[in-house]
Image (cartoon, rainbow, N blue to C red):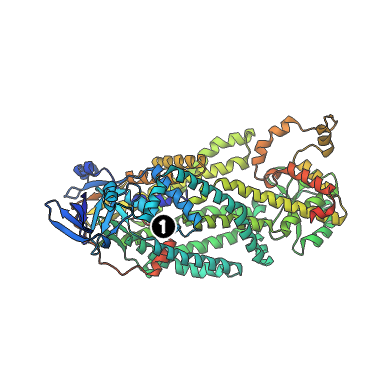
């Protein structure tokens, strides 16, 4: 499912049948206690799978023919397509980046990766991995978000990101704890007898899930709290507990799916119809799929439901079944078409996300002011965006 | 005249307006017909056409005019910007799209078949033997917990085999080569494999299946071939290099899956490696004064194929007493092929290999070089 996050991001930027929605008083539906009624503006995604497929296949073919140079143009065209087809309150989003800065950043990124590969070859790999990466990652994230936000606009007002390197380090340091714990656990696993390793597994997984929830919470808070639409800052209201319960429930979903599959599968194994090596990967895939779908919908919901602008907020109502069904259809069609369905899958997922996220406005949407113009993007941002893992929500 | 919305760039306010072009000057008028801005068209940035998404005219001061009327913009500009216009035409032409699909699949195939193996093998060559060995460290210990039990072969038998095979291991396997006996937790399955650190594992079932000591020797030579050619290392380097290249070339991780057909190509890497290991084994066996046919006969038994004489006879139309291939054996094959720990899945195309080895054994030695 790793191919999907991109759509999640673009979806977050998207829009809907605005004329109708403007007239519908949303507060009634929500029973919100605020006195001025809020208008609900659903996001709407207007792209179409075939249209994007054609853009995408030309992108990939030209990228190959130009040995990757065209990929910067491809990225811009692809992002422009998703942004421009995402509508909110009758207005499309806009992606403003031009290809050359992206190409420059990507060239530097490729050079860095080559350097890393080389160092890897001469036994320096671990040092780079353990020291340089933790130092560089927060910087790349901050710069990448700054670039992405500045290049995103709605109603001719750009987004901004005000996070700094130190704030990113503060948000992300628990990741290092996870990494250290994981390394330690693997070392322990290798040295201990299998029975003890199994015994250690459960507390280890629980601890890991808790830490992952902590990181997810801190990072979401960091991202939202330092984001701004023009001069208006976002606020993030979620609590750590919300994230912890999502991650624990995800674990529960995994156990549940495993149990159900086990009940179905064990008789088959005992009867000798299939052998265990054949069926166990199927069960594991089902577990991972269910856990990913559950976690994606739950974290998307809490993310948007906790983010707010003064006087405005979001409502996200993704469901496990809805998302799982969308993913399964995409997966099936992608396999059947030998991958040609993938671009259309991105569109389908973007549409699902947009259909289940809405913006609730209390005041007029005309009153946001644009941020001061900033100097042209620094190389740092260009490099940062090259490592951009499509994690931006706007 | 184009209908759209105008914003001044200072905030989110928009107003319905129209854009007019006269004498190279673009002018935006509000509903009442007053001019909101007027500037030379050459100084405005007009977004290129992208499917049917809205177009924007961006003025130097940050003002913007947006319209969904793509046809009107194209007509207004008369000649669409040549570079971006070409893209738009490509993206809306079905023949071009089909050509692009062919390019993508073709490139993925070439990349998988030739470029990736070459690059990955270069990398493997750069890697020091110590580093390669470290990659395999602990692999056996980890699999011991999950896959294997200690061997149930009698101690004397193990010692005897170690003694018999010691010479070959030393001469061809280098200092790191080491023999291990194991049996699968799941049941009796004949298999043999090599780990990057030089460990060679034989299962009890394989040892018992051999009708001649030289058959075990032949299998060990084949596995030493995998170690000497660093096949495990090269396979993993190839797999990761392929993904990385696709990502770098396209900037899209999802494109890696467009090349799903190339997974089949990746399987052919393994066929190539088996051939290399067989070649190594044949040469080593001849040097040792052992007939390479021992490798072929062992493979026949592992693969559930009929012995060579039976096959030859069947080809000539004579039934021979013995063990012709039974229908039951071939029926069971589908599931066995998918079994991750079965000999078939780790050693594909067994019949083809057997025939090749038998031909090579009959041929004069130079062909093996």
Q: How many marks?
A: 1
**What crowding class fits label 1: few (fewer than 14 Cα within 10 Å), some (14-19), or many (20 or more)?**
many
The extreme front residue here reads B23
Q: Examine the image and state in which quarter residue A122 appears.
A: bottom right
- Residue A335 is situated, as x and y percent measured from the top left of the image, at 51, 41
> Left or right: where does residue B175 sit relative to residue A337?
right
Q: Examine the image and state in which quarter residue A144 appears.
A: bottom left
The residue tagged with tag 1: helix, strand or loop? helix
| Chain identifier of the residue bearing label 1 in the image | A
The extreme right residue here reads B289
Residue at 77 percent across and 55 percent down: it is: B280
Residue at 60 percent across and 58 percent down: it is: A189
* Residue A250 seen in the figure: yes
Instruction: Give B123 or A137, whichever is nearer the viewer.
Output: B123
* Residue A252 seen in the figure: no
- Residue B275 is situated, as x and y percent measured from the top left of the image, at 73, 50
> Left or right: where does residue B80 sit relative to residue B123?
left
- Residue A88 is situated, as x and y percent measured from the top left of the image, at 27, 49
Report the residue marked by disc 1: A73
Instruction: Give A263 or A220, whichever is nearer the viewer.
Output: A220
Quadrant of the frame with the C terminus of chain B: bottom right
- Residue A248 is situated, as x and y percent measured from the top left of the image, at 43, 50
Instruction: Give B28 or B238, whichever is nearer the viewer.
Output: B28
* Residue A66 position (above or below residue A268): below
């Amino acid at each position: 499912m790793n191919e999907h996050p991109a759509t999640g991001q673009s979806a977050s930027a998207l829009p809907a049948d605005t004329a109708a929605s403007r007239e519908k008083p949303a507060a009634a539906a929500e029973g919100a206690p605020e006195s001025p009624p809020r208008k609900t503006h659903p996001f709407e995604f207007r792209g179409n799978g075939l249209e994007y497929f054609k853009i995408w296949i030309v992108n990939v073919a030209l990228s190959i023919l130009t040995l990757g140079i065209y990929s910067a143009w491809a990225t811009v065209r692809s992002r422009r397509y998703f942004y421009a087809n995402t509508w909110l309150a009758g207005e499309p989003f806009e992606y403003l980046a031009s290809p050359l800065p992206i190409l420059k950043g990507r060239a530097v990124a490729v050079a860095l990766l080559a350097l890393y590969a080389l160092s890897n070859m001469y036994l320096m790999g671990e040092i780079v991995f353990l020291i340089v990466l933790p130092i560089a990652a927060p910087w790349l994230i901050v710069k990448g978000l700054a670039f992405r936000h500045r290049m995103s606009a709605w109603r001719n007002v750009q987004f901004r990101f005000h996070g700094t390197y130190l704030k990113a380090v503060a948000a992300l340091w628990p990741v290092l704890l996870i990494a250290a714990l994981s390394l330690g656990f693997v070392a322990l696993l290798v040295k201990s007898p299998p029975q003890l390793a199994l015994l250690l597994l459960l507390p280890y997984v629980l601890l890991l899930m808790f830490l992952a929830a902590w990181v997810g919470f801190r990072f979401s808070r960091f991202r939202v709290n330092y984001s701004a639409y023009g001069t208006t800052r976002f606020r993030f209201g979620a609590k750590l507990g919300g994230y912890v319960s999502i991650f624990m429930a995800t674990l529960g979903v995994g156990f549940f799916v495993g149990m159900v599959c086990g009940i179905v599968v064990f008789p088959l194994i005992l009867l000798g119809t299939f052998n265990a090596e054949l069926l166990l990967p199927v069960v594991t895939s089902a577990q991972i799929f269910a856990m990913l779908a559950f976690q994606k919908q739950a974290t998307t919901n809490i993310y948007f439901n906790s983010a707010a602008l003064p006087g405005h907020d979001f409502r996200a109502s993704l469901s496990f079944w809805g998302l799982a069904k969308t993913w399964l259809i995409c997966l099936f069609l992608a396999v059947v078409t030998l991958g040609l369905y993938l671009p259309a899958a991105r569109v389908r997922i973007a549409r699902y996300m947009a259909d289940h996220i809405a913006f609730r406005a209390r005041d007029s949407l005309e009153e946001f002011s644009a941020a001061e113009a900033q100097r042209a993007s620094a190389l740092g941002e260009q490099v940062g965006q090259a490592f951009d893992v499509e994690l931006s929500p706007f | 005249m184009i209908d759209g919305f105008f914003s001044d760039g200072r905030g989110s306010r928009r107003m319905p307006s129209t854009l007019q072009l006269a004498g190279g000057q673009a002018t935006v008028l509000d509903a009442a017909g007053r001019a909101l801005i007027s500037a030379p068209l050459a100084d405005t940035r007009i977004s290129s056409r992208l499917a049917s998404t809205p177009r924007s005219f961006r003025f130097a001061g940050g003002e913007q005019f947006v319209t969904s009327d793509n046809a009107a913009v194209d007509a207004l500009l008369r000649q669409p910007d040549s570079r971006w216009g070409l893209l738009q035409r490509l993206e809306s032409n079905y023949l071009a799209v089909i050509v692009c699909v062919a390019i993508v699949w073709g490139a993925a195939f070439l990349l998988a078949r030739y470029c990736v193996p070459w690059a990955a093998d270069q990398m493997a060559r750069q890697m020091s033997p110590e580093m390669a060995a470290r990659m395999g460290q602990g692999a056996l210990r980890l699999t011991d917990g999950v896959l294997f039990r200690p061997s149930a072969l009698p101690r004397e038998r193990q010692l005897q085999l170690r003694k018999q095979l010691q010479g070959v291991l030393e001469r061809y396997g280098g200092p790191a080569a080491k023999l291990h006996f194991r049996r699968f937790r799941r049941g009796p399955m004949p298999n043999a494999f090599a780990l990057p650190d030089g460990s060679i594992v034989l299962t009890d079932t394989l040892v018992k299946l051999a009708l001649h000591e030289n058959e075990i020797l032949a299998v060990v030579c084949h596995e030493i071939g995998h170690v000497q050619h660093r096949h495990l290392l090269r396979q993993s380097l190839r797999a990761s290099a392929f993904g990385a290249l696709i990502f770098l070339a396209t900037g899209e991780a999802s494109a890696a899956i467009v090349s799903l057909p190339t997974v089949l190509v990746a399987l052919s890497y393994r066929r190539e490696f088996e051939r290399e290991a067989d070649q190594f084994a044949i040469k080593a066996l001849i040097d040792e004064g052992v007939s390479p046919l021992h490798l072929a006969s062992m493979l026949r038994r592992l693969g559930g194929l009929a012995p060579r004489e039976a096959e030859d006879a069947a080809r000539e139309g004579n039934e021979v007493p013995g063990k012709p291939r039974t229908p039951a054996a071939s029926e069971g094959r589908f599931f066995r092929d998918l079994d991750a720990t079965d000999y078939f899945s780790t050693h594909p195309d067994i019949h083809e290999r057997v025939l090749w080895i038998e031909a090579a054994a009959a041929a004069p030695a130079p062909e093996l070089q």
